[in-house]
Image (cartoon, grey):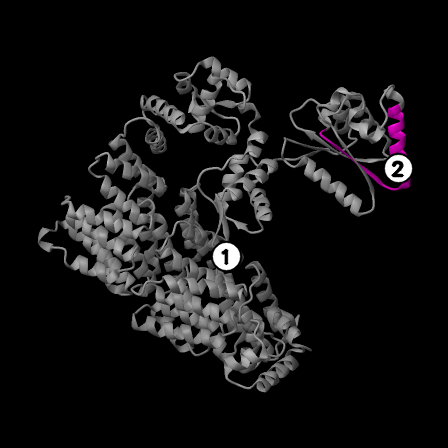
Amino acid sequence: MIVGAAGVGKTRLAREVLARAETAGERTNWIVGTESARALPLGAFTALIGDAIADPMPNVRHLINSFVAQQRQGRVLIGVDDAHLLDGLSAHVVHQLANTHNARLVVTLRAGTKPPDAITALWKDSLLARLDLEPLTVDATRAMIETALGGVVDARSARRFWKLTGGNALFLHQLVKDQVAAGRMRLMAGVWMWDGDVAVSQSISDMVGRQLHELTPEMAVVVDLLSQCEPLAVDVLCDLVGRGDLEDAERMRLITIERSGDQLMARLAHPLYGELRRAAAGEMYLSKIRGRLAQRLARDADADSQATVRRALLALESDLPPDPQLCLQAAQYAMTLLDLDLADRFATAAASAGAPDALGVRAMNLLLLGRGPQAENVLREIGEGGAAGANQWNTLRAANMIWMLGRCNDAAALLQNSGPDTESPADAAARTAVEACVDAVSARCGAAAEKATAALKSGLLSDFHAMLASVALTMALGALGRGDDLTTVAQGALDRAITSFQASHMRFWFGSVYARACRLTGRTEECVAMVERLADSAREVPGLAYANLASLMGVAELMRGDVRSAAKLLHEALAGVERHSVRTGLRPATCFLLAEAHAKLGEAEAAKEAIVEAQKCVPPDYLFMQTALSIATGWSLAANGCVNEAIRAVKSAAAQARQREQPTHELACLQVAAQWGDVSGAVRAREIANDLDLPLAKAVAQHAESLAANDGEGLLRASSDYQAMGDRATAADVAAQAAVAFTADQQRKRGLWAAALAKELSDACGGLCTPALRSPASQPLTGRQREIVELIVAGLSNRQIADRLVMSVRSVEGHVYRACQRVGASSREELTRIARAGPAATR
């Protein structure tokens, strides 16, 4: 017996059981209880009886006997849908069939109804096992949507569907269909996203809103008030409607009322009721409703910033005259709550209504939204208007040039032309903070650290400028390898971000550079802890904020080796970036990470696409991104079979990083080169390890030196070191290299153990397919053979390989033949399979 609420999927599940039984060759019958047939004796079985019913009792015996006879001819499965609607005799037949044990039954029953006693007895007397079908969970909702759409849906959209439908599968199916049909659900960067209002169709209205079709005027007002703002205190509602109307609405299950502390709170009985009413009501009527509600809420003190934002939005969308101070305050609160799009609406309304500080708030909000050109226009307007604090506005304009427009040289010129004669100490500190950003972006790490430290120590910075200084300092400390100093900076920055409207959204901005600094210094656990803290402080965040958060969560997963989860999160982040037309550093940074994730999974084409996108949007002035771009490009090349080119790319980047005095950037390049088999960086890696007090540096040096010496035990120690730092993906690569080294040294048992470790780590990371994990350990390949095998795995033909390597096709065929001999492959296809299996192919 399958029991559950309407729409949770009882009938679908029962039908699936019968369909599988039919496929297995069993006989099936499908009986449906309906309201119309309930008045007839044996009404559910009318189609089986055929003749008019005069005396029902013989027909009961006839029915039972006919089903028993079917059982003798083969196994029978009977489905009974909506058993709560069966008439007494039909229910009796079902009960008797269950008692005979000659026919098997699948019965569905709606929860909360009063079925016939015979149906209740089915599970009470243990004649049938009872399965209570619960509404879909968030994860199950997302899986169902992705199945319906045939693609990935972002977590925020899935959660929104789940909240609106209550996990009801029937409602969910229709709502998804409606949003796609109305163009509200769109495919962005390969991910389905739902933004904007709910599109309401007649189908969903008929399913959910039958009770709403015949509301009295008084009932309509109750529902409409809650459709605009819920939950609402009953005391507030009683000032706008009669208490009796509330009681009637609760009795009709239009609303629910629950006690919260010393207050009674009302909300709609189903989330979709509000959407249906908003779609049906006229805008002028709803404007009046919002106005009445805003005026009533204004009589009481707002409980918190969310209450102020809620009241301000009601007033903004009502027939009331604009309140400039309320809009300005709501804009700041909305920024604190990470809803920058709503903050822009409030700030624009406040400026139009004459609030004196509104333009400045709007300029800062536009900057944080990534709308650099618009922010530049507003800031220029402020400057031309002769507003007080010209030097501060210049620093804000310079920050916009650096981070949103990618014009670092223009920003430096603007700061240089700011008049020191008119600067206050606070102005000078703000200018120094922004100059630190110029230095950090331009890869002048020593100068950036010095200026940012001085600006923070002044104690004169606004929250916005303090966050800028923290960003610059974190970038510099990460590049210089001063990992121990990062924790203090991060603590202060995140504490500030949680409490200040100027800094609130910058938590993600800071988080991204802190995550990069943690990766450069091997601090995986610290990065994960920071991301978890940010996620806890930003639950249910709006669109752009979620894109930032998804990118950060993707970084954390990539650092600790859950590469497949990282790729999914990073695709969500890129979809959000695309949806909000972001052109800031978030776009290329996300593309770098996506390229690496896809490359590590062996998804060569996707890695290449990510790099092409990244190369289009990295500003020329962003020297600090060049190392990350080179490493991501290298991963893409390696995934596409061009390992030697990948090594050359990162070795060139390592040389540049050394010239710029970025030791951890250089170290990162040497690390990935070693993962791809390069042994030339061992000496330099040890020099960096001696200069930096970082476990990561020591692990890279151990890795490179052991690889150069073909030392399997040393490579296993390096693999263990990487694991200790949380980097399972690199540990898998190094363990695979150890397997090859052991095998070459005739240590077969140790080679098998290292290969098993590499396989275990690779599986834990989502199934890696890197150059190291594509190297068979049974008979190690020569350099040229390995190069050709990598290109074969990437899908190139012998002719394409010959053109790439500038050799004859016959030479390529010879190398392929000898590689097959070494690893025991009988064909090109088997060689590819063995290469993909890597060291584990020896087991």
Q: Main secondary structure of the magenta part?
A: helix
- Which quadrant would the N terminus be assigned to in this image? top right
Read off the magenta span. 59-82
Observer able to see residue 633: yes
User: What amino acid type should be assigned to the residue bearing mark 1?
Assistant: Ala
Q: CA distance from mark 2 to mark 1?
A: 54 Å
| Residue at the disc numbered 2 | 70
**Nearest the eye: 149 or 721:** 149
Indicate the quadrant where residue 692 lies: bottom left
Dot 2, how many residues are within 10 Å of its Cα: few (below 14), some (14-19), or many (20+)? some
With respect to residue 802, does 121 lie above or below? above
Residue ID for mark 1 = 567
> Which quadrant would the C terminus be assigned to in this image?
bottom right
Give the residue at x 31% y 21%. Answer: 299
Q: Quadrant of residue 693?
A: bottom left
Query: Between residues 136 and 660, which one lies in front from this camera angle?
Result: 136
Q: Is residue 79 magenta?
A: yes
Closest to the camera, between mark 2 and mark 1, is 2
